[in-house]
Image (cartoon, grey):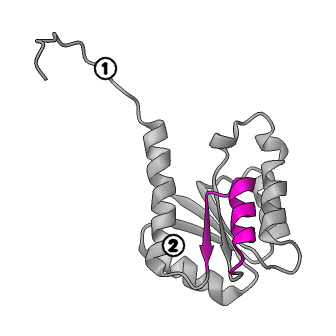
Amino acid sequence: MKVLLIDDIMANLRLMQRVLTQNGFEVIIESNPCTALGMVARGHSFHAIIVDFMMPEMNGMEFFKRYQKLSRFQNTPIQQIPPCILITAWSSSFTTEEALDLGFHTVLKKPFTNETLVKALEDIHNAIVFKNRSVRCVNAPFDGQD
């Protein structure tokens, strides 16, 4: 599963990259949300994006709003746009509610554990696998017993 990490603090990026790589994720890091948005706009594909809330050039909420409006997603149902996880040090429930209402998959409040980070991505991975799994029906006679 390929993940894009966006945070303006390089130490945070390196720590999350190490944890996720050790858990089998392919990780691309970017410290500038504008550059990250450009990567996605130019066609770089990710299964999920993790974005920090507080960054100098563009906050995580603004990134997500622009991300959803990219021309490559213009005719894509919202459920098929790769999901985003917001990470934040803010403890405001307003930020969490606003982020979830906007369409973020998950909001992780700092400090969070490595296990919480990995679980959030595993939940996305499991949803992708389930969504893409083909369903096979087998015709079998019904004998009237459960």
Instruction: Tell me residue 65's x, y (percent).
Output: 82, 56
> As drawn, is 66 to the left or to the right of 24?
right
Q: Quadrant of residue 52?
A: bottom right
Q: Dividing the image into 4 quarters, which one contains the C terminus?
A: top left
> As drawn, is 115 to the left or to the right of 8?
left
Q: Give the farthest residue toward the front.
A: 93
User: What numbered label is drawn on residue 117?
Assistant: 2
Camera-side residue of 132 and 94: 94
User: What numbered label is drawn on residue 50?
Assistant: none
Camera-side residue of 28 and 125: 125
Up the image or down, 79 lies above or below 91; here it is above
Q: Amino acid at mark 1?
A: Cys
Query: Residue tagged by mark 1?
Result: 137
What range is drawn magenta here? 91-109
Q: Residue at x 33, y 24 (%)?
A: 136
Q: Amino acid at mark 2?
A: Leu
